[in-house]
Image (cartoon, rainbow, N blue to C red):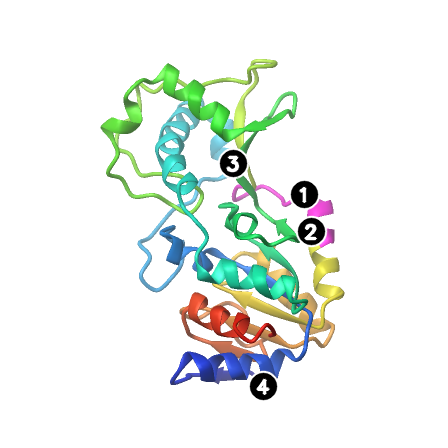
Amino acid sequence: MTETLHARSTADAATRVREVLGAGPVTVLTGAGISTDSGIPDYRGPDSPPRKPMTYQEFVGDAAFRRHYWARNHVGWRHVEGTRPNDGHLALAELERAGAVHGVITQNVDTLHDAAGSGRVIDLHGRFDRVICLTCRAVSDRAELAVRLTELNPGFAEEVADVEVAPDADAVLARTEHFRVADCSGCGGTLKPDIVYFGENVPKPRVMDAYAMVETAESLLVVGSSLTVFSGRRFVKRAVALGKPVVILNRGETRCDDMATLTLDHGCSPVLRALADTHRI
C-alpha cells in the first residue's frame, strides 16, 4: 500500500524518504519539476498553463511548421541556455559523490544535471544543446547554429524578447513567416534539435542503459515528474516489479502514485538539500 506523506517540515520529509529508500545507492529519475527553481517552467505542474508539445510527425512533415518551430526555438534557446543549476541539481551531484546516488535518469533536456556536476547522467529525451541532421545524422553544437540563425535573421530575437518559454526551449510566438531556417552545413539536410519528440521513440540502447541503472540500484527516487508519458513511467514499473522501494517527490499527483512505496507532495530542492546535508539518502 502506498504511503502518502504530508510532512510539516522539510526535515521530517527528508527523514521519511531516507527511511523508505534505505542506505542506497539509489537511482534518481527526474522530470521538469526539478528545474522550475532554475526558471524553466514545467509541462504539467499544478500551476502550469496548457501546452501542446510538438510531435515528430509535425516537424518532419511540414516545412512551414519547421520554420515556425526554429523561429520559436531561436528565442527560447537563449533563455534555457542562460539558466543555471538550482539547489536540487547540486544536492543530487553531492549525493552521487558521497555514494548515495547511483546515477540520474533525466527526462529533461536542459543539461542542468551535467552543469551541477553529476557524473552519471542518462539524458533520456536528448539534449537541447545539440542538433542532428535528419539526412546525414551529423550532430553539431546548438550554440554554433545560434550564430548562423542570428546571421540569417538579424534582430529577430530582440524583437520578441518578452515571450513564454517551454521546458524544451520552445517559445510562444505569434508570427514567424519571415524567419529564415538554416540547413545542415555538411549536406544541406534538415536540422532537428537532438531531442526525442512526442511520437518518436527513445533510442533502445539508451532505454537499456536506464533499465540497467534501475536494476543495479537498491531503490528508485522520482523527482519532479508527473510520470504521464510511458518513457519515464516504465522505470517505476521496472523497480516495482523487482521489489525495490520507490519514492515519488513531486508537486501534484502522478500516474504512478498507486505503485509507489511513498509519495511526497513537496518542493524538490528543499528535500534534496536536506538529504544532501547528511551526505546520504
The residue that label 2 is drawn on is 207
Q: Nearer the viewer, mark 1 or mark 3?
A: 3
Q: CA distance from mark 2 to mark 4?
A: 28 Å
Counting residues from the start of the chain, the first of labels 4 and 3 encountered is 4
Q: Nearer the viewer, mark 3 or mark 2?
A: 3
Amino acid identity at mark 3: Asp
Q: Residue at x 57, y 46 (%)?
A: 125
Determine which of the numbered discs, if any, sits on residue 203 in the image. Answer: 1
Does residue 269 appear in the picture of this structure?
yes
Q: CA distance from mark 4 to mark 1?
A: 34 Å
Q: Residue at x 34, y 38 (%)?
A: 171
- The magenta segment is 197-209
Q: CA distance from mark 1 to mark 3?
A: 18 Å
Q: Label 2's element?
A: helix
Counting residues from the start of the chain, the first of labels 4 and 1 encountered is 4
Does residue 225 appear in the picture of this structure?
no
Amino acid identity at mark 1: Pro
Q: Residue at x 62, y 67 (%)?
A: 236
Q: Label 1's element?
A: loop
Q: Are marks 1 and 3 in contact (CB under 8 Å)?
A: no
Residue 204 lies in the magenta stretch = yes
Determine which of the numbered discs, if any, sits on residue 1 in the image. Answer: 4
Counting residues from the start of the chain, the first of labels 3 and 2 encountered is 3
Q: CA distance from mark 4 to mark 3?
A: 41 Å
- Tell me the crowding category of disc 2: few under 14, some 14 to 19, or many 20 or more residues within 10 angstroms, Cα based: some
Q: Are marks 4 and 1 in contact (CB under 8 Å)?
A: no
Which quarter of the figure is the C terminus placed in? bottom right
The residue that label 3 is drawn on is 129
Q: Label 4's element?
A: loop
